[in-house]
Image (spheres, coloured by chain):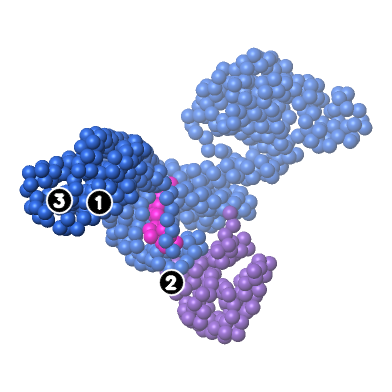
Amino acid sequence: MFRFGLGKYRTIIISITLFLVFDVGVLAMTFLISRQIASDAVSLNLAGQQRTLVQQLTKTALLLEQDATQGIIDSSGNSSFSELKELIGTADLFNATLEAFHQGGRMVDGRGRVELTPQDDIQAAAQFKLLEEMWVPINVELQKIKSLKSNAKPDLGPLLLVLVADNLNLLTVSNMLTSRMESLSAAKATNLRIVQIAGITLALINFGFILYYFLRQLRTSDHAVERAQKETEDILRTTQEGLFLLDTDFRMGMQTSHALSKILGMSDLAGRDFLALLKPIVTPKTFDTAKEYIELLLRHDVKEKLVASLNPLDCIEVSSPQPNGAIESRFLNIRFNRVFDAGRVTHLLVTATDITRRVRLERELKESERKVQDQMGMMVHILQADPSLLQEFLRNAIKGLDQINEELRTGTATTGMSAKRIDMLFRISHRLKGDANALKLEAVAQSLHAFENLLDGLRANPVLRNEDFLPVTVRVKGLYAEIHAIQDALTRVAQVRGVVTVEPPKPVQDPAIAALPFVQQWRSFAQEIAQRHEKEAELSYQGLDLAKLAQPLRDAINSIVNQFIRNAMAHGVELPGERKQRGKPAAGRISVYVSDAGDGFLELSFRDDGAGIDPEKIRVAAVRTGRLDATAAKLADMRKLISMIFEPGVSTREVVDEDAGRGVGLDAVKDMVTRMGGRVRIGTTVGEYCHFRVQLPLGAAAENANNMTDVNREAA
Amino acid sequence: MTFKLMIVDDSNIIRGKISRTLTQHRMEIVATAANGEDAIKQFSANQPDVVTMDLTMPRMDGLECIRKLRRMKPDLRILVVSALADKATAIQALKEGAQGFLCKPFSEDDLTDAMDELLGETHG
């Protein structure tokens, strides 16, 4: 059914209707008034005719009278018959006109039959009535003459008497009536002009309104359209996604987002066949599936949400050439959403996104997860492996990698590397891979296998350039990292379990760091105290160069390490004979490690492989020095007892010498660390090791370090 | 309104999971079938409104079964429940007349959401 809603066109339609109403009104009024004017013109004409008739009657009567006087008329009156006939005709016409004026009707004037309407003007009616009254006596006489037989001689005397008497009056009244009719007609003509002017003016005003309103609407609409276009353009220019519409013939729309060309690596995309564009960048199978999928969305009754997971273009890899000639591989996500019009799918909105970064991150995450799993597996194997074999493998691995590194450094500088040298690298790698497999270090074995593949590729290449060795160098660095990671893992395992034997007996040291003055000083200090107590000591250091730290922090670490060395050599490290009995090397091993923990703290790790801290000795010492009574000491747990070594006056040594016995050194260390905002932790296993871990804030105040100046001299 | 459902899947575990989940979701399980042939027989006897359909099954596969069921009841609602190993086959199933696809493995929420979507009762 047809429904007519004015909607936004309501005002314009009303305005146009008014315009037409005004025009039709003016036309109708013009027609009506002009008809009246035409009627008035007839009346005016007849009124003038009545005046003429009066004169004509008088003239005819006078002629008849003259004929009679001159004897022109015979006894039958035949000689004057025509004049008499004219007299009666004139009278009949006058009567008929009067009747027409009085009641309206048809009437014959000089131009033929005309229509007369009854005269409703009061003044004209009064004048007409006067005319009628003046006509009555004349008409009576005329009717007498008219009623005579044709051969009878008319007596014109009475007629002439009234005609002469009223002739002038009749003329005057007729003139007045004519004038009145003229003025009435003129008034109507004026009215007609007013109506026309008013009507046309209203129509023009209305037209002006229509024009104004229409133009304003047009302008508003234009603005809205321009703004919408601008917004669309802004969106298409700014969005990072490739957007376009796809019609049912798989043709791309004329508007596409600016990012689309960059994402697809193609230009001039508007209006192109999407399938033709897709075909060269995906596999034939993906292309066929994509075509089916798009057809499915366009032409079949399926639920869009329920088929999204079937989109074969949700992650496609495309390759495109770069300005530098290289081929760049990227990952794209192209998804489709239906666009409906009146319940029918008219287009698909296609959104293309470059998801390369996301895909790579996901892959890195997976790789990272794999590595974590590998490391977990490696930790298990480390725990199960023979420690000495493991250490030997690590030493050999570092040595082998050093060899490979040296070859790469010297061989590729100028002359490149010969096939013979590559073979040598291959052999080193292969040997290490065999060892790694034997120890079930699968991750390392796989890395070495990948390294061999790289070398294999180089061997097949007759002409080798320096840059061909770049991946080899990168892979060697990766292998170094893996070996160091195992060493770290070993250290952590040792810390957790307190198993000293799995720790590297001689940690690999950077010769440059070993030669640093502060390391030399610690080593010398350890040797000096060792000699004093008839012991042996080996100190190794890894980590930061203290010279690069702020003076207060450097001084603090130096003082703390010196105190720990003193403590280790005086208390922890056993005499060489005792150590041998326990299966340890004769020389006590001290490992020092300083690192930036990355959280604003510096971490100092100090570990010796001596006898550790015996809580029973501390229990005795605490009672001896009065720190605890016998009951409290009996109840104290191991944690409490070990923490007491940081309390003043507690020493397990009964004899005081220059290195121990006063119970001052560790108390001073703890005091200083606390005041600097740091903390000290201790781990120990009786008979195996003692490990201090000190954390100091990197911005520690200088003044606190100065409090340690005398610590060494007053060491417990 | 309760819909009559037929579950077609060669896995007893999957049939059980769909059955348990959708029984609590305004569905009356009127039939289950482990292959296409059985599904055709069960369909004639039970006249379900909705079918969940696996694609890879013995004797008669899901594609053939969908084709036949659509001929028997053109307004039948079919949800393909299958692994995503072969997207082309799944798309073919949708072209044959299924209206939705749910990828295995799926959660209970995945299944009820998919069923609501299939029956035109989406939430949020």
Q: State which region is magenta.
A: A338-357
Say which residue label 2 marks. Answer: B95
**Which chain letter matches label 1?**
A
Residue in the image at 16% along x and 52% along y: A153
Prevailing secondary structure class for the magenta stretch in the rendered image: strand
In percent of width and height, residue A697 lies at: 62, 25
Element at label 3 = helix
* Amino acid beneath label 2: Lys
Element at label 1 = helix
Identify the hue of chain A.
blue
Q: Is residue A400 above or below residue A350?
A: above
Q: Quadrant of residue A337?
A: bottom left
Q: Which chain is purple?
A: B
Quarter of the image with the C terminus of chain A is top right
Foreground residue among B106 and A339: A339
> Marks 1 and 3, Cα distance to the nearest angstrom?
12 Å
* Amino acid beneath label 1: Gln
Mark 2 vs mark 1: same chain?
Answer: no
Residue in the image at 17% along x and 41% along y: A58
Say which residue label 3 marks. Answer: A84
Residue B20 lies in magenta, yes or no? no
Which disc number belongs to residue A143? 1
Q: How many marks?
A: 3
Residue in the image at 51% along x and 67% along y: B100
Foreground residue among A88 and B28: A88
